[in-house]
Image: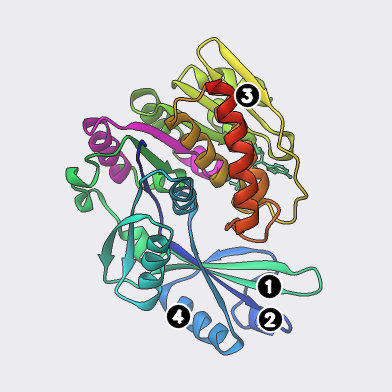
Amino acid sequence: MKSILGIGNALTDILAILPDDSLLKEYHLPLGSMQHVDMETGDRIWNALKEIGVKYVPGGSAANTITCTSIFGMPSGYIGKIGDDELGQLFKSTMEQFGVRTTMLHSDKSSGRCMVFITGANAERTFADYMGAALEMGPEDLKPEYFEGYDYFHIEGYLVQNQDLIAKAVQMAKEAGCIISIDMASYNVVESNNAFLHNLIDRYVDIVFANETEARAFTKLEGAEEALRELAGHCEIAVVKVGKDGSWLKKGEEEYYIPAWPATPVDATGAGDTYAAGFLYAHSLGMPLKECGEIGSIIAAKVVEVVGTKIDVPRWRDAKAEIRKLIDKVNG
Ligand SMILES: Nc1ncnc2c1ncn2[C@@H]1O[C@H](COP(=O)(O)OP(=O)(O)OP(=O)(O)O)[C@@H](O)[C@H]1O
Ligand SMILES: [Mg+2]
């Protein structure tokens, strides 16, 4: 079985259901917004939330993808940076519980977290992010041996803001012989690092995952199909995801539209991260391009049926059976 290494911002979601919006007012957080806060504010908010009762869910885009490839059975590793604190330990041990081999770097700053305030009858979400230790990961942290023995290297687009880190990481990954994939993560990231990202993808990246807005930001082209064709000129495999409308894939002359797998959606969080995991798993088994997209779609359809990013056991069982059928059909 081929192996995969991911790199990303090691962040833990701290979720709290609040009786009213008084805490939002106290911390000047507009309802429904996402704000970055400093360490002091981050610690004050966390302490206030602890009194109410919180749920901790370690995550971050690449961490979600890597957890999922590990559950598929791929030997999976993860590089991220945490503080010397409970939250960092929780992040590490949760990843390890899912079988991920972690390389956790340490910072003097406290561990990164995304505090999620859930308020009102519609469970509206307001976010206060403290990136902390995660933002401290730099090129000097990376060692060639971290990459040795891995077949795939997956990058979370949010890290592209740290250009020196990513430049060093892809060099080491290429030297180790890895196939390199990137999930573009957010159109803001693409817009503010466009030249760097173009150079990175042209020179190093084999597989690119983008949603429609990210693909548009990268190519300056409107439609998903037009953007797909342009993107595919820069890498070996281009994937453009269009939510409930499915995804588009292109590799050289091959091009496919993959409809979304049927689902009863409740929360789309993690759809993109999970799709990437299914796609890469299938690719590592040598599946044809179309089946890679279908396997990504099957597993993504399960995560949209649950709240949060962790697929439950019955849905994992269903997905694995559906995927097994597809693989058996290909293998005859
Ligand atoms: N409602 C849905 N029903 C079934 N499948 C879905 C649904 N929404 C998303 N998917 C699947 O998940 C894939 C990825 O979703 P999406 O296009 O939202 O990616 P994304 O924008 O990168 O997501 P994220 O917000 O997690 O980063 C889609 O291509 C599709 O296969
Ligand atoms: Mg995404």
Label 4 neighbourhood size at 10 Å, few (<14), some (14-19), many (20+)? some
- On screen, 317 above or below 30? above
Q: Earlier in the sequence, mark 2 or mark 4?
A: 2
Q: Earlier in the sequence, mark 1 or mark 2?
A: 2
Location of mark 3 (residue): 221
Q: Nearer the viewer, mark 3 or mark 1?
A: 1
Distance from disc 2 to disc 4, alpha carbons, whole Å, reads 18 Å
Numbered disc 3: secondary structure:
loop
Tell me if 113 is positioned left or right of 327 in this view.
left
Residue 79 image offset from top left, x and y in percent: 32, 53
Asked if ligand 1 lies within 8 A of label 2, the reply is no
Numbered disc 1: secondary structure:
strand
Residue 191 image offset from top left, x and y in percent: 52, 38
Q: Earlier in the sequence, mark 4 or mark 1?
A: 4
The image quadrant that residue 137 belongs to is bottom left
Residue 202 image offset from top left, x and y in percent: 38, 23
The image quadrant that residue 297 belongs to is top right
Q: Earlier in the sequence, mark 3 or mark 2?
A: 2
Q: Label 3 amino acid? A: Leu
Tell me if 291 is positioned left or right of 106 in this view.
right
